[in-house]
Image: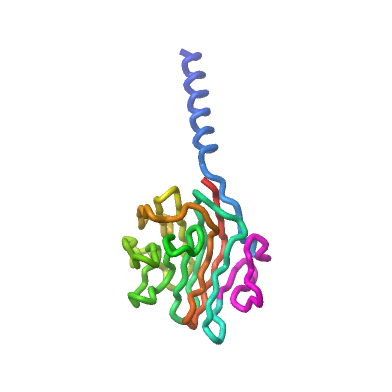
Amino acid sequence: MRQLLVVFISFIGLTLSYAQDDTPKMETVFNGENLDYWAVPENNIWWSTEGDVLWAKSDPDKVGSILWTKAVYKDFVVQMDFKFGAGTVDSGIFMRGDDQKNPQIQIGQSGSLKRDMTASPYVPQLGYPVEAEGIKSLLKMDDWNTIKAEAIGNSYKVWLNGVEVMNYTHTEANLSGPIGIQLHPGKDMSIQFRQILIARL
């Protein structure tokens, strides 16, 4: 009986170890001090760091900007905290580049729909093919939110503040590219980000 118990405990230990090893390792790509992991645009007037926070602020001409990772990703999960700032916030996460076929996960108000579409995928050729669920009860307009977006092949999932809110398959997407954070053109706005993490899957 004692031997069986030892074997059982060992099996449980191996199972837990496997489960822990199977969890993707999230790596920090914004350390609160600099933008070493990112391709900062020339003549940068949009992106700045203050403490542990990355600020995106519109320029006087409202040209807008996208901050791209230097690295290219295939299957991945990206997570970050965001907090709405001044103006009408229209931002988002580009999933594998800005190709017209690839989804962008919206953060804030949609310019076309004139309402908040946070966590929903926007595809230039399709608009918003699906809408994230339960956002109104989850989204904190005056505090920090955590958004996590996953891309595996043609499948996309999004979690907002720990709750899965969107699951979408887009068969036309390109499956490799950088990850981008958007400051939408034509907007007078600001938004803050912190604790930006990425894991390759």
Residue at x-position 55% and y-position 78%: 57
Occupied quadrant, residue 88: bottom left
Instruction: List x then y, in percent, for residue 107.
Output: 44, 68
Q: Nearer the viewer, residue 83 or 113?
A: 113
Occupied quadrant, residue 47: bottom right
Residue at x-position 44% and y-position 74%: 90
Residue at x-position 40% and y-position 51%: 154
Q: Which residues are magenta?
A: 33-56
Instruction: List x then y, in percent, for residue 74.
Output: 51, 50
Whether 48 is drawn above or below 119: the answer is below
- How many numbered discs sit on the rendered protein? 0
Instruction: List x then y, in percent, for residue 174.
Output: 46, 55
Q: Nearer the viewer, residue 35 or 6?
A: 35
Instruction: List x then y, in percent, for residue 193.
Output: 54, 67
Colour setup of the view: rainbow
Occupied quadrant, residue 117: bottom left
Q: Is residue 37 left or right of residue 142?
A: right
**Furthest-bottom residue in view?**
60
Judge whether residue 60 is colored magenta.
Answer: no
Judge whether residue 52 is colored magenta.
Answer: yes
Q: Is residue 118 left or right of residue 84?
A: left
